[in-house]
Image (cartoon, helix red, strand yellow):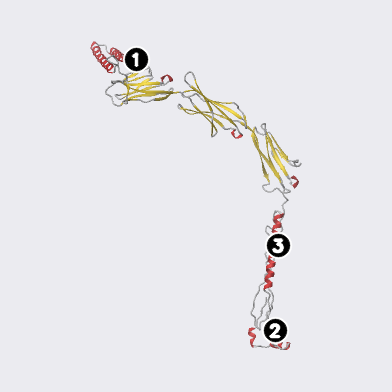
Amino acid sequence: MANARSGSLATILFLFMSSAALHKGECQSTTCGLFHYVNSCCVLLRCLFLARRCMILPSGAAQDPVVSQNLVTDNVTVVEGEMAIISCRVKNNDDSVIQLLNPNRQTIYFRDMRPLKDSRFQLVNFSDNELRVSLSNVSLSDEGRYVCQLYTDPPQEAYAEITVLIPPGNPIIEARDEVLSEGNETEMTCTAMSSKPAAIIRWMKGDKELPGKPKVELTYDKMYTVTSRLTFTVSKEDDGVPVICIVDHPAVKDFQAQKYLEVQYKPEVKIVVEFPQGLTREGENLELSCKFRGKPEPQRVNWLKVDDDVPSHAVITGADLYIENLNKSYNGTYRCVASNSIGEAYDDYTLYVYDAPTTTPKSTTATTTTTIITTTISYPEINQDTAPSTEPAAHDSRAGEGAPRTVDHAVIGGVVAVVVFAMLCLLIVLGRYFARHKGTYFTHEAKGADDAADADTAIINAEGGHTNSDEKKEYYI
């Protein structure tokens, strides 16, 4: 409390002397000097009154300042080098004086006057209810508790904590291995130096986040250095993928560093059939192409036949294999082998040569005889010959005439079997039909023969004009 009294008294005397010096420099005449002298005395009396009211000068028992809700302020967080705003606000002011003190209890502003020589402090606003001060180019030494003080009985105080953030330097990412081989383990480190508070480091490999092992160190200047270590196993899919070190700190955003992986891997091999597109048959040609990729690029590509030699007339051009005039002796497994400094890989193609294409014989539609049973009503005077009527089908289907079909023997045999079976079934049906519909012929010549005593009488009766001749009928097939 003694320190507070001494500081406040010094502030009052400073204000008085400043006012007197100012007025002395402005006035040259005796009348003007006398007027300002009286004014200075009034200022001094007012200051003494304020000092007594605030218990700055000894006058009875001293009273400690209290924290009151009538005087409010806010904590401030600012990045080093930027500007901080300190605001002291009074809800209900009875014409009491507001002042702002630094963490060492030195007066920064007394009302609207700045006793402190630090020009980084500037008055932003002053009224009966607020004292607002700015502090530019904030440094770590400015961090601490600032005091807003209201001269009442007892004095009221409010505290504003200024926290200074110091961003880390550019993150440094380092890799143990510059060039990797698939399946190997590697290690990377990322360092964020000289920050306050300590930074948080995260790792990303492509779209996947990986866990690291952080280590935090406090330096002599109350700064923090954070180092994170990442260990993982690489595959061929990691080639060209970025590994990103992300630094999270309240003073910076999107702070990161990255390093691209270079992974070497053995070749990947695939055999592609360029010709033919369908089945391979005798007499045709075969063209195979070997597709591969690896890192480093494969320098050697070989074709071989498993358990046998490649045909002598086969042509190998780089990664392509060409065989003319295939026959079944070429059947087997053909292999393409590619290799680089990491290893080798291969792919197999199994060749099976089918029979040469055959021409399908022209198909002929079987001629079917259809017997039409007709019933004719005949009269005696009309004579008609009875003869069967047949109409053979004249359709001959030759699918693809002039263009032989290429089919397998199994397909041809199946078609022939179906045709033979259909013909047998048709013959059986026709035989049963004719057996059930045998015709009986009745003519007028035999009419009356059943009633005659002898042959002559029967002929006479048949040739005569009988009355029942209208009932004579004739049936034929």
Could you give the CA–CA distance between mark 2 and mark 1, rounded to whole angstroms?
Answer: 167 Å
User: Which mark lies nearer to you, 1 or 3?
Assistant: 1
Q: Quadrant of the C terminus?
A: bottom right
Q: Which residue is mark 3?
A: 420
Q: Quadrant of the N terminus?
A: top left
Could you give the CA–CA distance between mark 2 and mark 3, rounded to whole angstroms?
Answer: 46 Å
Q: Kindly identify the amino acid type of the residue bearing the numbered disc 3.
A: Val
Q: Which residue is mark 2?
A: 446
**Can residue 364 be seen from the camera position used here?**
no
Q: Earlier in the sequence, mark 2 or mark 3?
A: 3
- The quarter holding residue 49 reads top left
Give the image location of residue 167, x and y in percent. 47, 24
Q: Nearer the viewer, residue 196 or 368?
A: 196
**Can residue 163 be seen from the camera position used here?**
yes
Q: Residues within 10 Å of mark 1 (few under 14, many from 20)?
A: few
Q: Residues within 10 Å of mark 2 (few under 14, many from 20)?
A: few
Q: Which residue is mark 1?
A: 3
Q: Kindly identify the amino acid type of the residue bearing the numbered disc 2.
A: Ala
